[in-house]
């Protein structure tokens, strides 16, 4: 930290992303990326001609991408906001709607970026513990009178709330913004996008990073009332109008238009998740029943940290947190069948060595 850093940022603990090794080849099951390449149309869209056009700024309105998203969800183009990853969309959301008095409430065990955004942007927040079984208690959010952000399905648990509950939370907090972060919705959740006509305080956030196989392209979006979207635009045009680059706009449009490819990828991942969940349970693991592209699991008799390190030794990266509440658990992204077979074999070997 230099002596020049503004005092107000001195105590911020930045978000720590999962490891992105650039050297040794690991089987990467630590940041919930897709094991599959982007839709075929993405490569066609990013061609020599488009690269030549990189000398020009991108379209600040990202028009073709916004149009494709609006078509897919049956909403107006003025109900779509696009950002440089949903992380940026969420940051603009905290910036636009949060403040010292405009609190945000979210589960204490959820996406680790929420408290970081709040602290960076001077937003008061309330992190509400989950129930002991890791489920969200809807009563903590119904009529709570603060802004709310819920990852649905939640991470790292993989548990999802139903639309009835989301609707009740939105209905009972009419003067607050209710943000539903649907990063994992395509793997078994139900999108709250169908509730947008009913609740003008609902903001649905999605990403291209997981189900659409484009984590490296950095595209996320929000759907909401035209008024909420205009507020997000106000943040963006006061900060970085060209937040999506030319290639991202093209890649995102192609990915959004290929619904069949999305369905193929998510179906494969859901089938692999089923198989991995069952196999881990046979091996004595406790595995939460996930609706996301990861599973959250622990094995009696071996601390999460030890299993994490042993898997790493064998070239397999998963995610582990030191927080005592979840220190026994690992979050394991669902990769291809071959990757998961290698993971299961390595886990089996480690357990055998442990119990010798
Ligand atoms: C991955 C993830 C994000 C961030 O996605 P990007 O679009 O890659 O920034 C946001 N929220 C949750 C819950 C996530 O898991």
Image (tube, helix red, strand yellow):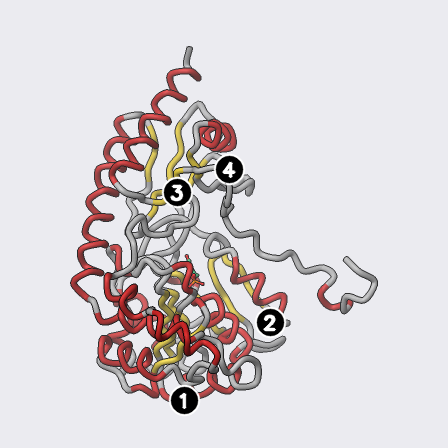
- Which secondary structure lies at badge 1? helix
* Quadrant of res 187: bottom left
Of tags 1 and 2, which is closer to the observer? 1
**Looking at the image, which residue sits at the far right?**
3
- Which secondary structure lies at badge 4? loop
| CB-based contact (under 8 Å), mark 4 and mark 1 | no
Q: Residues within 10 Å of mark 4 (few under 14, many from 20)?
A: some
**Residue 45 vs residue 139, the one in the foreground:** 45
Q: Image check: 166 left or right of 146?
A: left
Residue at (42, 10) in percent of width and height: 356
Between the C-alphas of marks 3 and 4, the distance is 17 Å
| Pointer 1 residue Cβ closer than 8 Å to ligand 1 | no
Between the C-alphas of marks 2 and 3, the distance is 32 Å
Between the C-alphas of marks 1 and 2, the distance is 21 Å
Residue at (36, 26) in percent of width and height: 346
Which label's residue is closer to the chain start, 1 or 2?
A: 2
Please give the residue where the numbered disc 1 appears in the rendered image.
227
Between the C-alphas of marks 1 and 3, the distance is 39 Å
| CB-based contact (under 8 Å), mark 3 and mark 4 | no
Which label's residue is closer to the chain start, 4 or 2?
A: 2
Decide if residue 41 is in sight here. Answer: yes
Residue 265 at x, y percent in the picture = 22, 54
Please give the residue where the numbered disc 2 appears in the rendered image.
123
Reply above or below: 150 against 97: above
Q: Which mark is residue 327?
A: 4
Of tags 1 and 3, which is closer to the observer? 3
Q: Residues within 10 Å of mark 1 (few under 14, many from 20)?
A: few
Q: Image check: 247 left or right of 312?
A: left
Q: Which mark is residue 29?
A: 3
């Amino acid at each position: 930290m230099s002596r020049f850093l503004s005092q107000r940022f001195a105590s911020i603990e930045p978000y720590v992303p999962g490891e992105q090794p650039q050297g040794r080849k690991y089987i990467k099951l630590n940041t919930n990326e897709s094991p599959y390449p982007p839709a075929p149309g993405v490569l066609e869209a990013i061609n020599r001609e488009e690269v030549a056009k990189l000398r020009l700024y991108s379209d600040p309105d990202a028009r073709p991408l916004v149009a494709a998203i609006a078509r897919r969800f049956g909403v107006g183009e003025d109900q779509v906001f696009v950002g440089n990853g949903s992380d940026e969309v969420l940051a603009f959301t905290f910036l636009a709607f949060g403040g010292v008095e405009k609190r945000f409430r979210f589960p204490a065990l959820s996406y680790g970026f929420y408290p970081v955004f709040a602290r960076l942007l001077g937003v008061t927040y309330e992190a509400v513990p989950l129930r002991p079984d890791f489920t969200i208690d809807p009563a903590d959010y119904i009529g709570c009178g603060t802004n709310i952000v819920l990852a649905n399905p939640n991470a790292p648990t993989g548990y999802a709330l139903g639309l009835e509950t989301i609707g009740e939370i939105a209905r009972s907090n009419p003067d607050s913004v209710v943000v539903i972060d649907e990063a994992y919705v395509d793997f078994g959740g139900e999108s709250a996008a169908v509730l947008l006509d009913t609740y003008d305080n609902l903001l649905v956030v999605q990403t291209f990073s997981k189900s659409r196989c484009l984590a490296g392209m950095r595209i996320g979006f929000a759907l909401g009332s035209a008024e909420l979207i205009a507020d997000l635009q106000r943040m963006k045009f006061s900060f970085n109008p060209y937040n999506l680059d030319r290639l991202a706009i093209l890649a995102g449009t192609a990915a959004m238009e290929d619904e069949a490819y999305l369905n193929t990828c998510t179906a494969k991942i859901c089938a692999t998740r089923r198989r991995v969940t069952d196999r881990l349970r046979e091996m004595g693991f406790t595995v939460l029943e996930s609706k996301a592209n990861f599973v959250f699991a622990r094995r009696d008799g071996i601390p999460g940290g030890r299993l994490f390190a042993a898997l790493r030794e064998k070239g397999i990266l998963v995610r582990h947190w030191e927080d005592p509440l979840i220190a026994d658990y690992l979050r394991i992204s669902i990769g291809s069948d071959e990757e998961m077979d290698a993971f299961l074999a390595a886990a089996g070997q480690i357990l055998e060595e442990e119990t010798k």
